[in-house]
Image: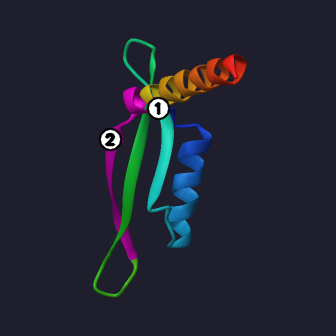
Amino acid sequence: FVPEDSDVQRLFRASVASGRIFPHHENEIRTRDGGTRTIAWDNVLLRDADGAVAGTASIGRDVTDERAAVAALARSEAFAYSLLEASA
């Protein structure tokens, strides 16, 4: 769920109105239980026969756990590197 008055909603609507859209974007959404998840979006404008914007198609993938794993790995690598540096 992305609140209607959010910056994400305003940016998305403005980009569609301009006829240009971000093909890839990530943002947080709020879940029913009040938590947040990070979603990676792939977007495309749909056009009618005259080339006018008729809508959008968007597919979202939950990357919350992937982003957390990448961050944990980076912390682990930094810690291992600091141990190596301290022992040298």
Q: What residue is disc 2 on?
A: 61
In front of the other: 24 or 74: 74
In front of the other: 15 or 52: 15
**Placement of the N terminus among the 4 image quadrants:** top left
**Placement of the C terminus among the 4 image quadrants:** top right
Image height of 88 relative to 34, above or below: below
Image height of 30 relative to 35, above or below: below
Residue 68, horizontal then vertical, whole percent: 46, 25
Disc with the residue nearer the chain's start (2 vs 1): 2
Q: Main secondary structure of the magenta part?
A: strand
Asked if the stretch drawn in magenta spans residue 65, the answer is: yes
Q: Residue at x 40, y 79 (%)?
A: 52
In front of the other: 29 or 39: 39
Q: Amino acid at mark 1?
A: Val
Q: What residue is disc 1 on?
A: 70
Residue 50, horizontal then vertical, whole percent: 34, 87
Asked if the stretch drawn in magenta spans residue 81, the answer is: no
Q: CA distance from mark 2 to mark 1?
A: 16 Å
Report whether 68 appears left or right of 56.
right
Quarter location, residue 35: top left
Mark 1 surroundings within 10 Å by alpha-carbon count, few (fewer than 14), some (14 through 19), many (20 or more) = few
Q: What are the residue bounds of the magenta stretch?
A: 53-67
Q: Amino acid at mark 2?
A: Arg
Report whether 36 appears left or right of 84.
left
Q: Residue at x 44, y 62 (%)?
A: 23
Q: Which mark is residue 37?
A: none
Which structural element holds mark 2? Answer: strand
Residue at the front extreme?
88
Q: Residue at x 48, y 27 (%)?
A: 73
Q: Residue at x 51, y 70 (%)?
A: 20
